[in-house]
Each structure stands twice: as structure tokens, then as C-alpha cells.
Amino acid sequence: MSVYETLIYEIQDNVALITMNRPDKRNALNATLNADLLSAFQQAQADETIRAVVLTGAGKGFCAGADLTAVATIPTPDDIYNAIVSAYVPLMTLITTLKKPVIAAINGAAAGAGMSLALACDLQVMAHNASLMMAFSNIAFVPDAGAAWFLMRQIGYSRAYQMAIEGQHITAEQCRNWGLANKVVPADHLLEETLAWAKHLAQRPTLALGLTKHTLQFAAQNSLSATIEYEASLQKQTIASHDFQEGVMAFMQKREPEFKGK
């Protein structure tokens, strides 16, 4: 187990479990937690034995967003610009491009940048009493940390704008109905069920699962023909992999494949 100041990093059966650990602050993001998260995801990326990642929060909340109590004075316009860009561009980019499935186990409220963090993950499992909240407008802010990018792609303009300007909690059931959550589970089974899903995905062909993330992101911004060409370029990588050969052989032999993640 790796040691961080503001999070807990554990490994369970090829799954990295990253737990934000500022429960007294509802895991609000400060400079240290932002840096620890980036480092933890870099560690998961570099470790070839890790084939899936779960992100969750300690205590009653997933992440309350930026820690406003850590700011002694109102920052200047340039200060806020630099803080947002330096903290969130590398972190959100890494999570969305990590070549392994990332699942958010949302154990309570995910608000503001905390909601962006949850939506940066590939899959979302929510406790039945959890919620997402675009809290920015409640302090006369606009969305940041990539919130607009994630919401526009997942629920479209009208619902995204509604969430942004109303600043209300969106329940777990509503999130599932809108496509913001893959699963809603009882709160006391959240981590158990999320880890079970992650461990299942960790036995899948990791290279292909990672490249599939890139394919979908490319497709969201490019034409059909360009996407087909991009898919073809990625297949050049998968066809040379151990898992492709194992998958074909298992299919021919009518048995379950034993993927190695490479």
C-alpha cells in the first residue's frame, strides 16, 4: 500500500482502489489532494499489474468540490485561472485517457469539481442516497474542472444547462435515468459491488478496453470516415497483442479466454 497525505492507495486483485481521505471536509479538493490524486493515477497507469481503478471517498461524501475554506482571501482573476488550469487539466486528462477502466464509487454528494471528478471516470456506481450537484452557480461561478465537457457529452445541452443554473442535488435515481450513472446500489454495498465490477473488468483484455476509451472520445469529435480510420489504426495494436490471439483461440476451442491484459 502506497502512502499519501490525503488519500489511501490500495491494491486488490489487479485493481487500484483510490480513496480520497479528508472525511472531515467531505473530501474537498485542496492543493495537496489534487497533487495526490494526480500522483495516484500516475502510479496506477505505470503499474502494469493494475488493470482497473476504483475512485471513492472516505466518510459520508464523495467530494464536495474545491475547498473554499483553504482560501484565506478572494483570489485575483489570474490566480483563479492559473489554479484551475494547473490543477484540473493534468488530472482530468489523465483519468479520461488512462488505458484502464476507471470506476467512480460515489458514496455521497459529488458537488462542483467533485462532480467533474466523478464524471471523468469511465463508469459511475452510485449509492442509493448519493447525488451529483453543479454547485458553481450557487456562489456565482461558472462550471469548471471540465464539468461542461462531461455533461454536454452525457446528457446534452438542456439538461446540462438546467443542472448548472439551478445548482440542485440530482438524486442517484435521476442520475441513472439521465445516463449519469451506470448503476445505483444500496449504500452499504457500494464498495463491495463496485470492486466486484472492477475485478471482473480487470480480467478482460485491458489493452483493448483502454484503446476503446480513446476510440469513443475520438468519435465524439470527428466524422464517421475519420473514426473508421482511427479504429483501423488501433486494431493494428490489438491484433499483435497476446489477448487477441488468446481470444480467437478460446473462441475456436469453445472455452473461456484467459486474458493477460496485454
Image: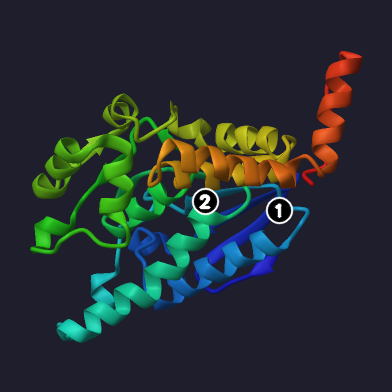
Q: Residue furthest top?
A: 254
Q: Tag 2: Cα neighbours inside 10 Å, few (<14), some, or many (≥20)?
A: many
Q: Residue furthest front?
A: 225
- How many labels, in total? 2
- Horizontal placement of 259 versus 223: left or right? right
- Horizontal placement of 139 versus 87: left or right? left
Res 9 quadrant in image = bottom right
Q: Residue at x 73, y 38 (%)?
A: 205
Residue 227: give its label.
none
Q: Residue at x 61, y 33 (%)?
A: 197
Q: Is residue 121 above or below residue 125?
A: below
Q: Let me know if residue 21 appears in the view.
A: no
Q: Is residue 136 above or below residue 236?
A: below
User: What secondary structure is found at the residue carrying circle 2?
Assistant: strand
* Disc 2 residue type (three-letter): Leu
26, 76: nearer the viewer: 76
Q: Residue at x 35, y 58 (%)?
A: 26
For disc 1, the marked residue is: 11
Q: Residue at x 50, y 69 (%)?
A: 6
Residue 10 position, x and y percent, is 66, 56
Res 41 quadrant in image = bottom right
- Among numbered discs 1 and 2, the one appearing first in the sequence: 1
User: What secondary structure is found at the residue carrying circle 1?
Assistant: strand
Asked whether the beta carbons under mark 1 and mark 2 sit within 8 Å of each other, the answer is no
Residue 55: give its label.
2
Residue 174 position, x and y percent, is 26, 28
- Horizontal placement of 242 versus 145: left or right? right
* Disc 1 residue type (three-letter): Ile
Question: Which quadrant does the N terminus fall into?
Answer: bottom right
Q: Tag 1: Cα neighbours inside 10 Å, few (<14), some, or many (≥20)?
A: some
Q: Let me know if residue 233 appears in the view.
A: yes
